[in-house]
Image (cartoon, rainbow, N blue to C red):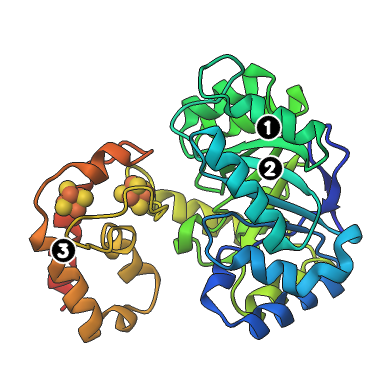
Amino acid sequence: MNKVHLGNTGIYVNKNGFGALPIQRITREEAKSLLLKAYDNGVDFFDTARMYSDSEEKIGYALEGFRQNIYIATKTTARDTESFWTDLKQSLESLKTGYVDLYQFHNPSFCPKPGDGTGLYEAMVEAKEKGLIRHIGITNHRLHLAFEAVESGLYEVLQFPFSYLANDEEKKLVNLCKNRQVGFIAMKALSGGLITNAKAAYAFVNQFDNVLPIWGIQKESELDEFISYHHDEPGMKDDIMALIDKDLKELSGEFCRGCGYCLPCPVNIDIPTSARMGLMLRRAPSSNFMTDEWKEKMNRVEDCIECGHCKDNCPYDLDTPKLLRENLQVYKTYL
Ligand code: SF4
Ligand code: SF4
């Protein structure tokens, strides 16, 4: 079984981390059985967040008895110290634990630092001194902020989107983390559903010995796929390299990653899927999106009031309203 060191935290875990965002969408018992199956098969790193509704609670419910054998990472979107402590208290309660192994600032729009006036970084240090958290981390979707966090020397772990669609700068970031001994957790290694070949996704990240991918898992079949790699590790063979090359050509340039940071939309447009509908239609069975429900959702794009909220909050600097209009046109063509 392939393992990875998370920077210099001393955390040394199975290369398949469990991303617990999708377990929000399944029942408590289904989540328990999935989490226990992952644990029984050697998965020992679980990443969740306060904002993933009942995800923390389901982890606490399923894995309380195995707490000492696993690592738990969670996140706070707090932007002031009062919410920081409220979030941390709630996370500990939900997870049924006295500490979290890694506590991360969840995609902040700035890099919290000591003396910046927010008190957030100082709160992290205090939580660590009190033994409530073991390590300090930050997650982000903005490249410049990720570099700033790593270069600051203040963070032990960075969580950032990383897949075979990564550009040279993103690969540079991974190497910087390695040189600085900052742990690197790869989120969205399937690029929010655009990468449909899990073997290729795994084979790519597996080339980076300092990267811990966390796979968003909702179904047992998805878990089984990743567990199978413990014994039969996919490598960068010719067929996988050809597939990656093809995807790189198809997915180059500006495209929506489905991260959802542009939400909420005041007229309730489902931006993360609507803004990449053309790609989804080409890469998934198009019949999935030809339903009355999707026709209605796509038609909502015409209600856009150009408020600019999505554009201002997109970490990839996309012109989201324009992208939505273009994708609506593609959708109509398919219809
Ligand atoms: S610009 Fe349009 S799509 Fe974007 S948030 Fe505003 S209404 Fe929604
Ligand atoms: S438009 Fe931007 S912020 Fe919204 S889902 Fe796509 S990539 Fe994320």
Compared with residue 118, is residue 183 higher up or lower down, i.e. above or below?
A: below
Looking at the figure, which quarter contains the C terminus?
bottom left
The image's mark for residue 124 is: 1
- Residue drawn at 45 percent across, 49 percent down: 248
Which residue is depicted at the point 74% across and 59% down?
16
In the image, residue 279 lies at what x, y percent?
33, 62
Instruction: Give the mark count.
Output: 3
- Observer able to see residue 32: yes
Of the residues shown, which amino acid type is indicated by label 2?
Tyr
Q: CA distance from mark 3 to mark 2?
A: 39 Å
What residue sits right under mark 3 in the picture?
A: 328
The answer to whether mark 3 and mark 1 are in CB contact below 8 A is no
What number is the disc on residue 202? none
Q: CA distance from mark 3 to mark 1?
A: 44 Å
Q: Nearer the viewer, residue 203 or 54?
A: 54
Label 3 sits on a secondary structure element that is helix
For this view, does 275 lie left or right of residue 46?
Answer: left
Q: CA distance from mark 1 to mark 2?
A: 8 Å
Q: Amino acid at mark 3?
A: Leu
Task: Tell me the residue that label 2 is attached to.
Answer: 103
**Mark 3 against mark 1, which lies toward the viewer?**
1
Q: Position of residue 110 (x, y in %)?
A: 47, 27
Residue 41 in view (yes/no): no
Which residue is found at the position 59% from the left and 54% from the top? 49
Contact (Cβ within 8 Å) of mark 1 with mark 2: yes
